[in-house]
Image: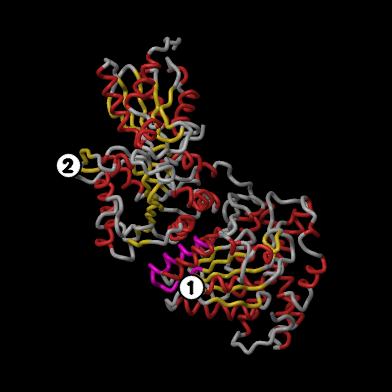
Amino acid sequence: MDTGSLHHDNSLDSPSAVRLLETMLVIRRAEARLAKTVKEVGLPGPLHISIGQEAIAAGACLELSDRDWITSTHRGHGHFLAKGGDIKEMFAEIWGKESGICRGMGGSMHVADFAKGIMGANGIVGGGLAIATGAGYAAKLDGDGKVAVCFFGDGAANQGVFMESMNMASIWSLPVIFICENNEIAEFTRSAEVTAGTLCERAAVFMPATQCDGNDVIAVHDAVRVALERARSGQGPSFIEAKTYRIHGHVESEGLFIDVTRYRAAEEIEAWAAADRDPIERFLVHIFERSILTREQVTGMEEEIDKRIDEAIAFAEGGADADVDLVYQLLSADKKVMEVAR
Amino acid sequence: MTRKRYTQAINEALIEEMERNPKMIVIGEDVEIDMFGDLATLRERFGPDRVRNTPICEASLAGLAVGAAAAGYHVVLHLMFANFIYTAYDAIANQMARLRLMTGGQIKLPITVLTVYGAGGSQGAQHSDCPHPALMNLGGVDVVLPAAPADAKGLLKTALRSDTPTFFFEAAGLGGSSGEVPDDEYLIPFGEVNVVEEGTDVTLISIGSMMKPAKAAVKLLKSQGVSVHFVDVRTVAPLDEAGILKAVARTGRVVIVDEARERASAASEISALVAERGWHTLKAPVRRATVPNVAMPYAPAAEAAVMPSGQSISALVSSILAEKVVAA
């Protein structure tokens, strides 16, 4: 796997490069603030932070439009933001507010915005695999070039639905892109210890399968672009294994209930967080080498993003609490069928 | 009115609603070949894009239905035998029944799950179950168990126009039964019991497949001079609470017949409802006629022994008729 600075002869134009950088910075800085907030003042539920994995969400979503679908994981903030989800509505959701994107009914693990094609983060490992396949089934029937991109982790690749969904996508040539974010650790278990063979070998039975450096945003973008061409032109699904690493824990509060040194060493985290492996630092080398932006411009971008995050926190904190009555109103789409609450 | 078979009525509802809604698709294992009669001619009429065999992978099929429904289709998923609901249960319980609430009501999930349930044909313990109580407990899904052909058609048409995932249970033991079905178009709303027969001595509440033994019990009781107020629940989620309480108040005595296992059955839920809110109308203890807490055996005699029968139901009725009247 490549590490260090990026050396690509690709056609990524400067505006696209700026967008990729901005998306990664938004995810990084938003999640850092979430992690800080949960530590300092607390938030209602568990938080699964994707810091270190931003290049996959950003690179995969760059070419998608609102009408394309994505499904996400319990570690879903990055996918939500990269696909165009609103940061204020996401924060309000995590704060459990009526103004949240899911009106406070979903929380961090279920952020979704169907109008933007975001079918939602999911608390069931592998839960998005079949849903994305179903969205791909619908897209194929619609026949208008939509695609469904399914983000999932190395842990989900050991669920039976992984094989089942890839099988269906393959036999029906569905426009689905399966992107496995292999961060090496399934919750607190090393994936290598619980996974037979390689994921690409598994997927290659069903569809073209490639591995890419998931901390290289251009490599992710390139791999997804090839898969998108296939999907949009009716040639069927693709599998991409994006190798990456989770800098934060499985869940922010894990230090309270486990000895975190038992599943990985601090040196391993440090090595992946270093500038030669960090997806943002590596992309900045590319940005500066090609004079796409100056250091000052990047600092300006970071300040602007932090302002947006401040606003999102203010929006979330100032919002009304979730409407308890919604629990009774929303479960069923048909008014008639809700039994009267006693 | 025309006399029609149960499966024929179901088939007619599917044809009519698929003609009405071009975005309605039928998927599932062996749906093209039509194992039960309910899917007859669908493949020929509507073609491969709308009627398609799937691999045998229930766990993913339920999730696939969620994705396709969220993306704009009415998905009719045929899960063949109701025991296969257990195989599909993750996506049913964690996705199908939850997604609308979790997303703050952003989506509708027009999904109709068809499935054949119940014992009586020596299908053994993995093809005879009645999992409707587990689905009642989920919330977020409707659960329909028609007994009469006319109800099957009218309730299925409602399901096929609903934006809430609906489980439509086809009683294996009633597939060949027939009854009068209206010729003109009609829909039957969910959450309304049907009073099959008016009576004054005891209320008998039947759920789905239990129509057959319940009818036999009514006949037996009649011959003994007992007047039975006979009610078919038709849908267990939503449950017609007012209709049930009214039917119980009519006689003050009730037996509920359910093919589910006794523990946490639909009959148990109805019993709790009557105990909590119909207590003042009761003259005798509530009784349930169900399958005991066992797996369904294969041998015909063993199978018959654990199923509620006309005899066992009427015996239960007699037992509460003998109870002393308590102060009302």
Residue under label 1: A237
Whether residue B275 appears in magenta in the rendering, the answer is no
Screen quadrant of the C terminus of chain B: top left
Please provide percent x and percent y for residue B322.
39, 12
Residue placed farthest to the left in the image? B2
Given the image, what chain letter belongs to the residue carrying mark 2?
A: B
Residue A73 lies left or right of residue B55; in this view the side is right
Q: Which mark is residue B2?
A: 2
Element marked by disc 1:
loop
Q: Label 1 to label 2, Cα distance in Å? A: 49 Å
Given the image, what chain letter belongs to the residue carrying mark 1?
A: A
Q: Which residue is at a point 62% across and 55% down the rendered structure image? A: A109
Q: Which residue is at a point 60% across and 84% down the rendered structure image? A: A12
Please provide percent x and percent y for residue B144.
38, 41
Element marked by disc 2:
strand
What amino acid is labelled 2 in the image? Thr
Task: Look at the image and give the residue range highlighted in magenta.
Answer: A129-148
Residue A267 lies left or right of residue B170; in this view the side is right
Q: Is residue B193 visible?
A: no
Q: Residues within 10 Å of mark 1 (few under 14, many from 20)?
A: many
Q: Which residue is at a point 42% across and 40% down the rendered structure image? A: B130
Question: What is the total number of numbered labels drawn onto the structure image?
Answer: 2
Marks 1 and 2 share the same chain = no
Q: Is residue A295 visible?
A: yes
For the residue pair A338 and B236, the one nearer the viewer reads as B236
> Which secondary structure type mostly characterizes the magenta part of the structure?
helix
Residue A284 against residue A176 in the figure, above or below: below
What amino acid is labelled 1 in the image? Pro
